[in-house]
Image (spheres, grey):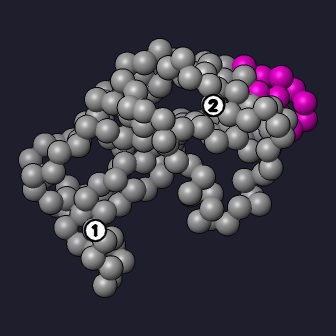
Amino acid sequence: VADWPLFFTHQQFGVVCFDTQTCRVVYNDFEFGNPAPTGPASALTPQAYDAALNASYGPVARTTPPAEVVWRSKDGSELRTELDIAAIFADGAIRHQVPREDIPEGISMGTTHVLIEVNDRTVSVYTRTMIPTKREQIPGNKHSAFRDDLIKVYSRTY
């Protein structure tokens, strides 16, 4: 592909909470999370966990001010942090695992998905981007010529 590396200017955003008593994230003046207790991620199948990490809010500019994360962990500790998404993605590069030679010519990117996961005392930031590929990822499925790998880009335990 001619444009390399791939960059994004805006994002779709989402939040998922596991093993928390309460969970609240404010980003771009919008509130996400769950005021009720949430179950463990381990209760989900790998497919359900992957599906849970989705981003449906946006588009949001890459330069949006930090997200405020306030939650009560499984043990009852009240925790708070700010996540500066703009700083985490300061270079604007799309994180992905698709080799350049596997991406068709002429594609145009511009967006990625950014996801915050609050899991008990750990906050992680993931990204996923639908990257077109020259070949089917599932042989025989003509609708599978893409990858959208979930990639962890930041994690901290409090």
Instruction: Tell me the amino acid under the disc marked 2.
Output: Phe
Residue depicted at x 90% and y 30%: 76
Q: Is residue 157 visible?
A: no
Residue at the extreme top: 65
Q: Which mark is residue 145?
A: 1
Seen from the viewer's position, the closer of residues 56 and 157 is 56
Q: Which residues are magenta?
A: 71-80
Mark 1 → mark 2, Cα distance in angstroms: 32 Å
Report whether 98 appears left or right of 42: left
Residue depicted at x 25% and y 59%: 132
Residue at the extreme right: 75
Q: Main secondary structure of the magenta part?
A: strand
Instruction: Tell me the amino acid under the disc marked 1.
Output: Ala
Asked which quadrant contains residue 127, the reply is: top left
Q: Are marks 1 and 2 in contact (CB under 8 Å)?
A: no
Judge whether residue 9 is colored magenta.
no
Q: Quadrant of the C terminus?
A: top right
Vertical arrangement, residue 80 with respect to residue 100, above or below: above
Report whether 122 appears left or right of 64: right
Residue depicted at x 49% and y 42%: 55
Disc 2: which residue: 32
Asked which quadrant contains residue 140, the reply is: bottom left
